[in-house]
């Protein structure tokens, strides 16, 4: 079992570009969570998805950010028109069902220049 | 949402010492987990422990759900234990993280 795979590990984007972060959950896991960790800060919940459904996106900024978890393929966190304040580590976690322990990926470190 | 408070915010230990980290939460929860973020930024699950006691090597954890707190025990600390320890709780699809306890173990 390969664990939760996130790619890319590091991503550099210029202001105004789009960033697409991918998360492949562990085999058999149908629940995905995205978190953001700003420099020198703790983890902040962004969104919780099940296959083809967004369950809770209360932590997502209202503009420029979107997430999906299609029936086939990885979960995608998309940030449009990135700004310097989006620079952070973005972690994904997956679990086999609700209210069960979840496993984190290694994260994607986004740098906006 | 549920408020999660971790204490102490910072902890400096001499190698070999024991310590206890605490996580208080403001309401009943479906799930509680402890994580370790090492100095390289990796997040490692330590325990899934909505209630009861679990042990894994030098680490153990106890959650008293009725009193809304959890404790993480580190025994015979090693320099590799350094990093930030987070607890998080899940209730009704809502996740809440504590601010973490930063542990520094000195040789």
Image (cartoon, rainbow, N blue to C red):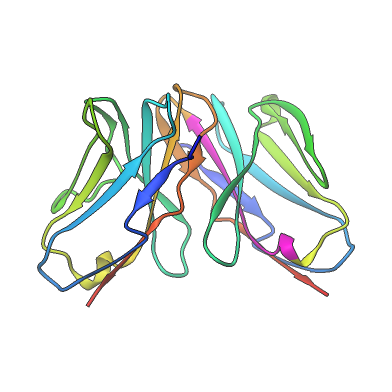
Q: Residue at x 46, y 64 (%)?
A: A41
Q: Residue at x 26, y 64 (%)?
A: A86
Q: Quadrant of residue B103?
A: bottom right
Asked if residue A107 is among those painted magenta in the image, a careful observer would answer no
Which image quadrant is residue A37 in?
bottom left
- Above or below, comparing residue A50 to residue B87 in the picture: above
Q: Is residue B31 above or below residue B61?
A: above
Label the magenta part by its dominant secondary structure.
Answer: strand
Q: In which quadrant is the C terminus of chain B drawn?
A: bottom right
Position of the N terminus of chain B, as image quadrant, is top left
- Reply above or below: B57 against A14: above
Q: Residue furthest front?
A: A1
Query: Residue visible at 27% across and 25% down?
Result: A51
Read off the magenta span.
Answer: B80-90
Residue extending farthest to the bottom is A113
Q: Is residue B54 left or right of residue A74?
A: right
Of residues A84 and A77, the one drawn nearer to the viewer in this rendering: A77
Front-most of residues A30 and B5? A30
Residue A110 pos. (x, y %)? 30, 65
Q: Position of residue B53 (x, y in %)?
A: 78, 30
A56 vs A106, left or right, is left
Q: How many numbered marks does the figure carry?
A: 0
Where residue A54 appears, x then y in whole percent? 24, 30
Relative to A92, B22 lies left or right: right
Give coordinates of residue B3: x percent, y percent: 51, 42
Q: Residue shown at 42%/24% (left/top)?
A: A28
């Amino acid at each position: 079992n390969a664990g939760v795979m996130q790619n890319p590990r590091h991503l550099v984007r210029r202001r105004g570009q789009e960033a697409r972060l991918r998360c492949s959950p562990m085999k058999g896991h149908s629940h995905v969570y995205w978190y953001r960790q700003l420099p020198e800060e703790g983890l902040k919940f962004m969104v919780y998805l099940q296959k083809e459904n967004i369950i809770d996106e209360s932590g997502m900024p209202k503009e420029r950010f979107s997430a999906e978890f299609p029936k086939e393929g990885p979960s995608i966190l998309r940030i449009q028109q990135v700004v310097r304040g989006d620079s952070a580590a973005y972690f994904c976690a997956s679990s086999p069902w609700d209210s069960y322990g979840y496993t984190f990926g290694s994260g994607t470190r986004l740098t906006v220049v | 949402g549920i408020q999660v408070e971790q204490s102490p915010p910072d902890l400096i230990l001499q190698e070999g010492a024991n310590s206890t980290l605490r996580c208080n939460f403001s309401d009943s929860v479906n799930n509680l987990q402890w994580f370790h973020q090492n100095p390289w930024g990796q997040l490692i699950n330590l325990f899934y422990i909505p209630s009861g006691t679990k042990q894994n090597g030098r680490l153990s954890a106890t959650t008293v759900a009725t009193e809304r707190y959890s404790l993480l025990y580190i025994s015979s600390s090693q320099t590799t234990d350094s990093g930030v320890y987070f607890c998080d709780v899940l209730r009704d699809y809502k996740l809440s993280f504590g601010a973490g306890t930063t542990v520094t173990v000195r040789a």
